[in-house]
Image (cartoon, rainbow, N blue to C red):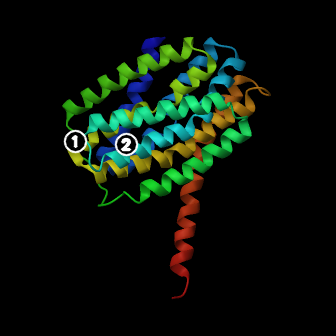
């Protein structure tokens, strides 16, 4: 079972890396920000655990979303002047402190969702100010793909085993930890620079709307419907939410262009 879980994580990391190769850093970040890892892990947790425990983990994960977004912003900010190890240290320190504080608050589902949404809007605006340059296909050497994969699998193994055996609040903190949000920018910064890293992380924040829709749907539906149905609706929400966001943004841009003057 652990091998299956790690294979799904590997597919997520490779998918995000190939998206960067084909469409640029922002596309890779977008794919990494979607629930590509937590989705399969949650499916397996639903098989191995009662729905009440999985819902508690999903709620703790939702409560930790502002801390995860703080991680992304701190990395993007530090990347302007710091090497990647310092960026990782600062970003993960901010995440752990923020996540544990939020877990201690134990916000109710509606409050956690509202705070997560506000944090998502703020993070998107902050990181957008650091984005520069043009986006296009990215050269990722095959050797670097193997290193990305190895690091992601090592981190994922710790997260999966920790989340399965830890209390729900700690499990949520672990599941919300950005595995690809650590791996991809740490490889992007030394090779492509701070602006490219900011584009990657801006895409990551964009994809987080799907992540939040996924965990919020689980929190809302697991107490009232069959776990399989709750999971399918959560997956649908993860796919539809970014699409609706893109449509809304295109409509706003179109309205601005059509205004006279």
Could you say where residue 57 lies in the image, as x and y percent from the top left? 63, 24
How many numbered discs sit on the rendered protein? Answer: 2
Indicate the secondary structure of the residue bearing disc 1: helix
Does 144 appear above or below 123? above
Does 2 appear above or below 16? above
Q: Count neighbours of disc 2 (C-alpha within 10 A) and say few if under 14, some if 14 to 19, many if 20 or more.
A: many
User: How far apart in space, not on screen, are marks 1 and 2 (Cα)?
Assistant: 13 Å
Q: Nearer the viewer, mark 1 or mark 2?
A: 2
Taking depth in this image into account, of 172 and 86 the one nearest to the observer is 86
Q: Are marks 1 and 2 in contact (CB under 8 Å)?
A: no
The label on residue 235 is none
Read off the residue under disc 1: 190
Q: Count neighbours of disc 1 (C-alpha within 10 A) and say few if under 14, some if 14 to 19, many if 20 or more.
A: few
Does 261 appear above or below 173? below
Task: Please tell me which residue is depicted at 42% across the width and 30% down the height of the picture.
Answer: 179
Task: Please tell me which residue is depicted at 75% across the width and 24% down the height of the picture.
Answer: 226
Could you say where residue 94 lies in the image, as x and y percent from the top left? 45, 36
Task: Please tell me which residue is depicted at 44% across the width and 39% down the height of the picture.
Answer: 71
Residue 252 in sight: yes
Residue 34 in sight: no
Task: Please tell me which residue is depicted at 67% across the width and 39% down the height of the picture.
Answer: 112
Indicate the secondary structure of the residue bearing disc 2: helix
Answer with mark 1 or mark 2, whichever residue precedes in sequence: 2
Query: Does residue 45 appear to the left or right of 219 in the view shown?
Result: left
Classify residue 109 by image quadrant.
top right
Could you say where residue 48 lies in the image, as x and y percent from the top left? 61, 12
Taking depth in this image into account, of 163 and 220 the one nearest to the observer is 163
Classify residue 28 by image quadrant.
top left
Read off the residue under disc 2: 75
Could you say where residue 222 lies in the image, as x and y percent from the top left? 73, 27
């Amino acid at each position: 079972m652990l091998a299956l879980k790690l294979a799904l994580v590997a597919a997520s990391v490779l998918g995000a890396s190939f998206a960067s190769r084909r469409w640029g850093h922002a596309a890779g970040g977008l794919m990494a920000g979607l629930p590509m890892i937590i989705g399969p892990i949650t499916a397996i947790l639903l098989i191995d655990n009662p729905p009440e425990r999985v819902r508690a983990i999903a709620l703790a994960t939702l409560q930790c979303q502002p801390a995860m977004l703080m991680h992304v912003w701190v990395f993007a900010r530090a990347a302007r002047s710091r090497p990647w190890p310092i960026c990782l240290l600062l970003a993960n320190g901010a995440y752990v402190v923020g996540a544990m504080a939020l877990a201690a608050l134990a916000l109710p589902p509606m409050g956690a969702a509202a705070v997560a949404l506000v944090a998502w809007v703020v993070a998107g605006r902050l990181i957008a100010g650091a984005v520069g340059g043009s986006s296009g296909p990215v050269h990722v050497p095959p050797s670097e793909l193997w290193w990305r994969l190895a690091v992601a699998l090592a981190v994922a193994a710790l997260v999966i085993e920790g989340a399965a055996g830890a209390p729900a609040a700690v499990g949520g903190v672990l599941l919300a930890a950005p595995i690809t949000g650590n791996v991809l920018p740490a490889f992007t910064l030394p090779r492509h620079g701070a602006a490219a890293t900011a584009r990657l992380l801006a895409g990551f924040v964009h994809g987080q709307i799907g992540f939040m829709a996924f965990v919020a749907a689980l929190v809302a539906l697991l107490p009232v419907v069959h776990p399989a149905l709750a999971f399918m609706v959560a997956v649908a929400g993860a796919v539809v939410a970014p699409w609706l966001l893109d449509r809304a943004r295109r409509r706003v841009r179109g309205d601005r262009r059509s205004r006279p003057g």
